[in-house]
Amino acid sequence: MQEDTLLQLNNISVVYSDVIQVLKGVSLAVTEKHIACLLGSNGAGKTTTLKAISGLLKTENGKVTDGDIVYEKALIQNSPPEAITRRGIIQVLEGRQPFKYLTIEENLRVGTATRWGKPYGKDLEMIYDYFPPLRKRRKTLAGYCSGGELQMLVMGRALMAHPKLLLLDEPSLGLAPLVVKEIFDIIERINREQGTTIVLVEQNANMALRIAHYGYIMENGRIVMEGEAADLKKNPDIKEFYLGMGAGGDAKSYRDVKSYKRRKRWL
Amino acid sequence: MDFFIQLLVNGLSIGFLYGLAAMGFVMIFKSSSVLNFAHGELMALGAFVFLVLIGWAELPVYLAFPLTLVFCFVLGFVVERLFLRPLIGEPLIYVIMLTVGLASMFKGAMLLIWGGNLYTFPDFLPEGLAIQWGSVNIPPVYAVSIVIGLIFLMLFGLFFKYSSQGIYMRSVADNQPAALSLGVHVRKVFALSWAIAALVAGMSGIVLGIINGINVHDLSSIGLKVFPVVILGGLDSIGGAVIGGIIIGLLETFTGGYLSTSLRDVVPYIVLVFILMVKPYGLFGLVEIERV
Ligand SMILES: Nc1ncnc2c1ncn2[C@@H]1O[C@H](COP(=O)(O)OP(=O)(O)O)[C@@H](O)[C@H]1O
Ligand SMILES: [Mg+2]
């Protein structure tokens, strides 16, 4: 393990309900203060990987059955989420998941759960500075906010916990391109200014590779490729199938993707 | 006119007690979706513990009352810890059946100790609290019940609106996976909601015991009144529980006063059916926010 590795997954397998194996020996390492992105199509196992790290797997009857997860030199696989969040790992769930009947500001206050009783006024100010639209709507019920506002809300809520490691699950999902750009700019700023280490799960490889330092590509519960973000962006396979830039410029048919997948098994 | 005012005051004070009791019930439902069938027994237990402290141990009220509340609060914690917690993650119907079992267990224990007799508290409320206004005569206990009801409603309102623990509790009721992802201790929230529910149940048990006397059967069947109250108010609204309680309390006293005492237990249910036909989620039930 390198000196500046914050999180390391060593060959982990994850099984749901004792029978459904989803991750089949996933290994990855996240460098402190960096952004690592985890790319892959629907059903590849990205969310499962994040839940294995954050301990939320437990609530879905899932379990890490093999391998280990090392965070700051401690083994954390299969610990309960209450314990893992208190070590500084916070996951922002896919699909945003606001507390609909709480106001924006109350939503943000739930982020103080891991450090109950400590002052949080400065943190609220910081969140409102990162996400100015939230300040205006602090008294509005989250259920009435737009998708972009909600993405800001759930990221701000997570930041209230002072995470060392932030796990973001598809922040771009269902947002307009301009909003996506705004969100990704803020993610990059948070990483740079707060020194927060980030694992970014995305299907939007284009945006993710733009801000990430390192990337992993996942298919069928395995990591099939990894590398520096700059190198991944140049890789022809990735260009073709994740960045939508085929050699001939035309869209690839489903059959091509299939054969690519078959080929990739051998990578 | 005086008769009307008399009934109004009586109805309000009974209604506040129903509302308080229902509030505890709703709190458990909101945080963990469990319908607690042992609520009436928790009310009776509060009344009997108070009886022991004030009648047998002869403690002064200002000690006996808070001690009883502390006892109920701790009891709620213990019940959650011993009986509910092992069932977290099991199908809800098991948990609800468990509360039915808890109800018989508590009732059995109380019958064993105190039998089915009717007890009364020693007279400890100062006569000075009685309000005399023309021919309207409000006994001290009714005045006290309204005051206690208002104070506790305000305290809980502030707690849920402003305190961090209150906000964590609401977050669990709202979206449990999201609350877990932020490190909210969901099991602690369940325990706290049981503790608070037992506390308010015990408190309303005490005051109802002052009004009607203390009897295991009577008090635990008053527990059943929380059902029309919470259905009326909307199962998931704490404020609705209180207002539902007041409405049922008023309906009961007015029916008893103007129509006949034998109808007083029936009319509230008839009105309930009509209200539900118009508002199926109860008066204050959450209407799902769709825009997300
Ligand atoms: N709770 C669960 N129980 C059983 N299977 C699950 C569960 N959650 C996810 N899966 C399965 O695991 C696979 C990977 O899912 P997921 O990790 O959500 O993928 P991704 O986030 O990459 O889209 C899918 O085939 C999905 O059906
Ligand atoms: Mg996913």
Image (tube, rainbow, N blue to C red):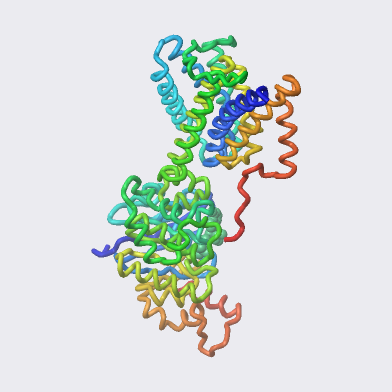
In front here: B221 or A70? Answer: B221
In front here: B158 or B76? Answer: B158
Q: What residue is rendered at 40% in x and 15% in y?
A: B60
Q: Quadrant of residue B268?
A: top right
In front here: A223 or B175? Answer: B175
B243 vs A206: above or below:
above
Residue A116 in the image, given as x and y percentages of width and height: 35, 46
Image quadrant occupied by the N terminus of chain A:
bottom left
Name the residue furthest front: B134
Q: What residue is rendered at 50% in x and 67% in y?
A: A148
| Residue A49 visible, this angle | no
Q: What residue is rendered at 37% in x and 80% in y?
A: A231
Residue B69 in the image, given as x and y percentages of width and height: 44, 25
B264 vs A259: above or below:
above
Name the residue furthest bottom: A248
**How many discs mark residues in the rendered view?**
0
Q: Quadrant of residue A168?
A: bottom left
Residue A6 in the image, given as x and y percentages of width and height: 30, 61
Q: Quadrant of residue A164?
A: bottom left
A108 vs B89: above or below:
below
Image quadrant occupied by the C terminus of chain A:
bottom left
| Residue B226 visible, this angle | yes
Residue A228 in the image, given as x and y percentages of width and height: 35, 76
